[in-house]
Amino acid sequence: MAAKSGNFAKEKLIDEEEEVLQAVILADSFNKRFRPLTARKPRCLLPICNAPLLDWTFESLALAGVQEVFVVCRSHAELVKEAIKDSKWSKPGSGMKIVPIMTAKETFSPGDAMRDVYTRGLVTSDFVLVMGDLVSNIRIDEVVRAHKERRRTNKDAIMTMVVKESGERHRTRAKGESAVFVLDPETNECLHYESVQGYPRTKGINVPREILEAHPEVDIRNDLLDCSIDVCSVEVPSLFQDNFDYLDIRRDFVHGILTSDLLMKNIYCYVAEEGYAARVQDTRSYESISKDILSRWTFPLVPDDNHPGGHIYELTRGNRYIAKGNTVELSRTCNVGKNTLIGTSTTVAENVTIEASVIGQNCRIGAGSIVKNSYLFEGAVVGAGCIIERSIIGAEAQIKDRSHVAKGCLIGEGVVVGPDAVLRPFERLSRKRSVDDVAADEDDDNSDIEEVESNQDSIDKTGLGKDSNAVVWPRGAPADEESDDEGPENYKNQRFMRLGDNASDLEEDLASSSDSESDTESDSSGEFDPYNDRDSISGLSDLSLTSSALDSTTSGLGLMADAEFRTEVTQSLARAFAENHSVDNAAVELKTLRMASNVPLARVKEAVIEAIVERVPVVEGDMAAQRREIAVVVGRWGELINKIGGVDPVETVMMLQVHCASSTRLALFGQILAALYQEDIVEEDDIRKWHELPSSRAEAGSVDEHEHHHHRKPFTEVELENMRKCWMIGTHMIQQFDAQGSDTETESENDTETETESEDEKKKNVATKAKATENESESEKDTESESESDEEEDVPKGALPTTSAHGIASGLRSAAAVAAVAGGAAGVAAANADSPSAGQAASVDAGRAAGTAAGYSAGIAAGLAAAAAVVGAVVGITQKTPVETPETSEEESDGSSESEVEVKKSAVAPATTAAATSASATVPTKVEEKTKAATVVVGATVAAAAATTLPQEEKAKVTPLAVTTTAAAVAPATASTSAILLSATTPTATVPLSATTPTATAPPAKAAATSADSPSEDSSEDEDSSRANTEDSDSDDGMSDAVSASEGASSANPSATSSTNVSEDEDSSDADEP
Amino acid sequence: MVSETRSAATSRSVEVLAQKLRRRQVVGSRAAALETLLVLRQVISKARFSNLEQLVAIIRDAGRRLVDAQPKEHSVGNTVRKILHHIREEFHAATRGTVVAKPASFSISKFVLQGQPRKHAVLPKSESKGTLRENDPDDPDSFARGLKPVLMEAIQDVLDELETVYDNISKNAKDHIHSDEIILTLGMSKTVEQFLKSAAHSHNYSVIIAETAPSYDGRIMAKSLSEAGISTFLVPDSSVFALMSRVNKVILGAHVILANGGMFAVSGSLMVATAAKAHSTPVVVCAGQFKLTPLWNLYHEYGAHDFGNPSDVLGFENGDLVDKVDVVNPYYDYVQPELIVAYITNDGDHPPSSIYRLLKETYDDEDNEL
């Protein structure tokens, strides 16, 4: 074992010195393909080449250096346990510790077994999961190494499946049960898995389009032999536990993981270049694997070299293996053909012909018999003159003289047949159980055996011979077949797994049916498919690849399910609305619902948007009231649209448009869109993008193109008209954005305003913000502050390093927008707001993004605030929900705090106008409470007090925010967006900081609070600001101050000083003032 | 108690090696010999015995288990035999005088009857070091205590020999290969590689290497030699005969050297040797002494060719063919002594006809069957 290259080996040693490689063997087949051979013995103890399958499996694992093996056994568990105890593996020095695990009889699937593995907590690290019928010489340790290597970089790579390249028609490849793997050729990541079965024949698979979009190159392969060797991470059993409906490891688990967009786990394939691995999963593969072993594909696991049963065989020419030690009696005239294995103490009489067969130990074959392609287990006795073809004869079975066993027969343990018996092909025989056996088997689930035994009278038993004790198992398809037609266990599909059955009639069946199909096809397309005549069940060429759209529910069935789903969603949402669930809970409920009904995401989103739109009460005539209502609803529930997964604002707008167009609430479109925009559920760019979509314009013919709606009935003229109206609203909105964005803001804004005023009132809600701004803070002030904002750049010049110029500029702009409302000291405020970011060069990016976006939202929020202070405050409060997660790094939090500082004005302004005094009255006392949570609550109270409406739950919500510091890592982009979402309010300012740097938590809140309650005392720099605005500027000062130095304000954490690096000492005086 | 745990520990180490051999995790004659040696050293150091027979039985038992685990790796058995031989030798040396030396003179006519040539070399000396006594009733361990250090020394000698085997073989390389000669070889044999590289220090010559399908080890060899600055040609196996007329000497490696002077070597060797015979080109085999095996009829055993995995010859992915074609992929060829001119070992150069004598010197007759 010297072939490990230096560096890596060392690393490995350090890493895994103490780590024991574990393996889990599922020693139960969970199906009955080997019946009746498995009536008294589990499949894993059936011999293949005279050694129990389980020993082959152990040997395969031992090759890989597995040290600890858990054998999960269910049926005949005692037998398995005994066998393990008696085997060489339990001897010292075997190097493997084998622990049999008896699982409950209620374990009906591999999934159940995995859940059992989980509940028992067996595995502690990455482990190898194999079936108890594996024959392999693959270097699994290399797979494990590759897996671990991958895990080091990608924690979501939970599993590595070992597959082997085999031809389309390889004998070892299961025809009835294969699979299509969609692989990334570079990384071998398994992108999609679809099982393929022989009957009913799988004719096409659906590859989700996302896969084709995300990967420039994919391999879609049906020529891979699934070895059922999986290297799993520890969380795999727990995933089974979480998803109680996973039964099969491949069809359910792998398929489920790969198609789930919630779990976000990756599964990889290891395409084994060297080595052999296969599962004895049916009688057909039993035959082919026996042949593979005899022709040495499993080397060094071959009878004459490393026979797992410990027997020693001598290899002679033509792959004949005869047990060593002169115990085998071969008569002089017998003819032992190629690829044959003969066990110890077996007697072969004269003129016997044995070809390509495996004869167990202590067998006797009578004179003149012919045994071809058959498998005789230990102690089987064949009389004289018998013919046995392609069959499996169980242990101690007796085939008496002159009997003929046709192909595909399975003769159970101890069965006596003959003399002169003639068995039909595919006959299955077992011995009738004695009374003792029945009693012993009581706990086993042998209902099928009982059934078989009770049905004997109806079966024709002629041909079994007069000495026979056999019970005949049902021939042909069972009557209740239809119910079970879907899975791979149906009768016809099982025929592909049957020994000796080439299922040619089925293939013809299928071929003819596909021919007829292709006929119709070629009729319509005028093309001839040359592949149809080489029709094989598993042929790659037969798999037509249909790329499914996001929604594959275009069939009638799908529509029905769709309608059902719609009502479910509506009900669920209605309940959420009525009972005032939290957005998260509602989102979880919808996700579950979606999983259950298997509906594409877009459908859920549609339903949610629909529900929200319908939720808005229509207020006739009163625009302000209407806006309030919308703001309430969207503020409360808008976030749900993104929470259900798959954030795509453009799609959201599109859906909103489509819905409004067909709804009576067409008039609300603009306002809702504005509300969404304000909530940052959609952003300016999204609206622009939507606006550019041809389908949004409702041009003739373009509407239907939009795929998310192709299942809908075509739009009526009215709806089209409405769509156009909506689009017009969008046009105005965008014009407004343009106006805002440009430097000549004032004019264009005014222009828009005047324009919008003259426009249809639907558009007014967009305009109202601007209008409100105008009304409340006067456009002159607007211009004034705008111009000031330009000049402002001079004010903080010393404090601003050039690196953050861009961030500052945007910050200034946003501050300017705010200043429009505040009308006074915005310049100073902006300067102060920027100083923390200036101090932290690292936060430039976050600060910039946050600053820019905050500028917009602040502008709008400010406008709204001025228009309706109360509503604005409420909005501000409701918006803090999404805040807590994204802040992971200090920089980000700083950046966001900066943006908050600016944004805060909008909410604080209303606070001042509405309830400044009350806030200032409450705060100072509470500031004395030094605990973080308390401070946050204080913050909440401030805001709540400021807002006259005081939603009870908000307070409750804030407290946990401060506690939950386990913010998930979120991309900076989201961080900045959500930073925008903060949209002010004192408590929100606290939250992000508390999420990251607990030490810094208290000061900002306090400082903010401080500023909030010191309206009369202007800071040294804010002389020129008007009274109403001192609030804002103060709060800014306080904030930056709090971030930098917390020595002020008596209380709080001294450690905050050390944890922050922005120290603008001139501000400290402000904080000290109270 | 102590002895039980001790023997359990030694039996475990034997078992571990046996498994590795069986699973072919230890491959290559030299590696197997080294591993065997280390295990045997452990066995001896932990063994408790009070006379020679006990010690020999212990070692034989361990050796038999190893040999049974992998009968095709003959160097395992050879190492065991060699150790036994050394033990006896040391024992005789230590108890010299107490055992009466056979009075006989060397005679070729009595060669077979006389057995080991070594025993004639023993000069009857006066009784010295008679301290080593078997079956001392007072102190049963005294024998082991007295013998163990010398045994360890003897094992160390064997170990050293194994470790220096390449150097010792190649030290005469320049006498076998001359300037401007063309040498043909095949496969990847460490011994041959060292031999050729050593010869390259003093002579300028060319090497033709056959690819050696299906393992294509010849390619590795070619790379290694050309990196050492030897002018190297890599040719397909099929062109060996055509090129043979130009070749001055064929140098091969060996897997096992049999008592009759024949050998098992990587498959393809027979073809090369036969071609060489047709052109009367000398065939020289480089091999360490540990490959000498006291068996002469191994070629009767079909399985001795050690048939490997058909996947080297026919890819598993050729599904259709796998079912219809029987693939035979032997690792080794048996090369008859008539085809070989000389063996170059770390113990000097020998013609195939004198291998039997070398064997007699190296091993004890009673160990031929372990």
Image (cartoon, coloured by chain):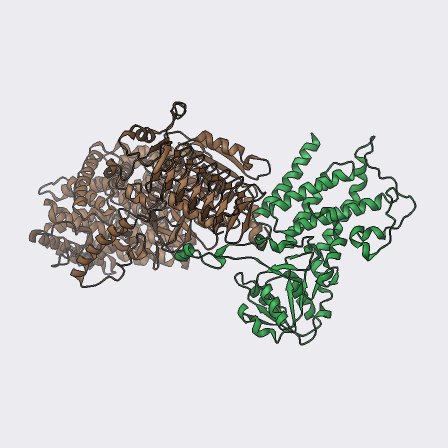
Chain colours: A brown, B green
Query: Up-down: is B20 above or below B228?
Result: above
Near-viewer residue (A507 or A740): A507
Q: Residue furthest left?
A: A717
Measured from the top left, where is residue A728 in percent x and y? Answer: 13, 56
Q: Is residue A975 left or right of residue B265?
A: left
Near-viewer residue (A615 or B1): B1
The residue lying at 19 percent from left, 53 percent from top is A707
Measured from the top left, where is residue A954 in percent x and y? Answer: 28, 35
**Residue A1015 visible in rendering:** no
Near-viewer residue (A1036 or A275): A275
Measured from the top left, where is residue B335 in percent x and y? Answer: 62, 62
Q: Is residue B341 left or right of residue A966?
A: right
In which quadrant is the C terminus of chain A drawn?
Answer: top left
**Residue A308 visible in rendering:** yes
Q: Is residue A979 left or right of residue A5?
A: left
User: How many numbered circles does the render carry?
Assistant: 0
Measured from the top left, where is residue B107 in percent x and y? Answer: 84, 56
Indicate the quadrant where residue B203 lies. Answer: bottom right
Near-viewer residue (A700 or A778): A700
